Image: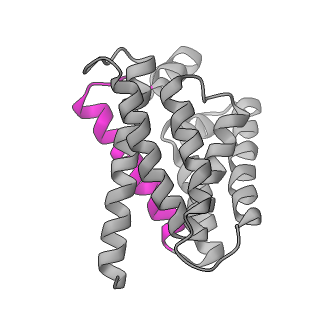
C-alpha cells in the first residue's frame, strides 16, 4: 500500500475498533441491548480489528498492547465481550505482516506511561490536573510521545482514530461515558 492509502485504511480500522469496543462495553455496562449476545458479537468484532492492527506493525503492537496491559493492571477486563477482545488482541502478536521482533520496550513504555499518569491523577489534586484528565489528554500525551520517540505516525493516529470511534459510538448510541460520570462524582461537573 502507498502511504496515504495505508494511513486511511489503518485509521478507518482504528476508528471501527473504537466503535466496536465501545459497543461491546456499552452492552455490558451501560444497558445497550441491540439483540441477545450483541456484546459478545461486538467484542469479537473489536478483537478481530485489534488482531489485524496489532499484527500489522511493531508500532501498532505497542500502541494497542500497552493500553491492554494497563486494562489488565486496572482490572478493566471484567466481562465476556472484553475477555474475548483481550484474548484476540494478545493473539494478534502472531499475525506478523513483516519480519520483525516483538516490541517489548515499546509495549512497556506505553504501559508505564499509563501507570505513571494514573498515579499522578490519583495523588495530585488541582484544577489543571482535573482539566487535563477530564479531557483525556493523558491518552494523547502518552501516544504522541511514543509516536515521536519511534518516529511513526501510527503510534498516535491509532489512538486518535480509536478515541474518535469511541466518541462517535457514545454520541450516536447515547452511551454515557464512565470517566465523565466518575469525574462528576469526584470533582463536580466539567466546565
Q: Up-down: is 109 above or below 96? A: above
Q: Up-down: is 72 above or below 187? A: below
Q: Residue drawn 70% across and 64% down?
A: 106
Question: Which corner quadrant holds the N terminus?
Answer: bottom left
Foreground residue among 184 and 4: 4
Q: Residue drawn 57% across and 69% down?
A: 96
Q: Is residue 117 magenta?
A: no
Whether residue 38 is visible, yes or no, is yes
Q: Is the magenta stretch mostly helix, strand or loop?
A: helix
Magenta-drawn segment: 153-177
Q: How many labels does the image show?
A: 0
Q: Does the magenta stretch include residue 169?
A: yes
Residue 182, image x, y percentages: 54, 20
Q: Which colour scheme is used?
A: one colour
| Side (left or right) of 171 relative to 113 | left
Residue 97, image x, y percentages: 52, 73
Q: Which quadrant would residue 28 be assigned to in this image?
A: top left
Residue 13, image x, y percentages: 36, 57
Amino acid at each position: 500500500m502507498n502511504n496515504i492509502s495505508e494511513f486511511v485504511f489503518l485509521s478507518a480500522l482504528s476508528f471501527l475498533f473504537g466503535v466496536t469496543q465501545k459497543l461491546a462495553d456499552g452492552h455490558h455496562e451501560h444497558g445497550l441491548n441491540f439483540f441477545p449476545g450483541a456484546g459478545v458479537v461486538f467484542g469479537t468484532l473489536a478483537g478481530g480489528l485489534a488482531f489485524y492492527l496489532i499484527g500489522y506493525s511493531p508500532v501498532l503492537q505497542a500502541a494497542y498492547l500497552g493500553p491492554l496491559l494497563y486494562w489488565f493492571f486496572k482490572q478493566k477486563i471484567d466481562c465476556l465481550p472484553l475477555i474475548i477482545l483481550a484474548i484476540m488482541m494478545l493473539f494478534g502478536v502472531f499475525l506478523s505482516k513483516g519480519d520483525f521482533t516483538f516490541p517489548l520496550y515499546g509495549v512497556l513504555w506505553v504501559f508505564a506511561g499509563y501507570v505513571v499518569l494514573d498515579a499522578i491523577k490519583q495523588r495530585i489534586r488541582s484544577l489543571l490536573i482535573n482539566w487535563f484528565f477530564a479531557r483525556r489528554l493523558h491518552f494523547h500525551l502518552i501516544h504522541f510521545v511514543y509516536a515521536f520517540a519511534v518516529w511513526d505516525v501510527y503510534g498516535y493516529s491509532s489512538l486518535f482514530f480509536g478515541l474518535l470511534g469511541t466518541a462517535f459510538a457514545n454520541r450516536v448510541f447515547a452511551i454515557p461515558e464512565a470517566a465523565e460520570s466518575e469525574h462528576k462524582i469526584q470533582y463536580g461537573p466539567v466546565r
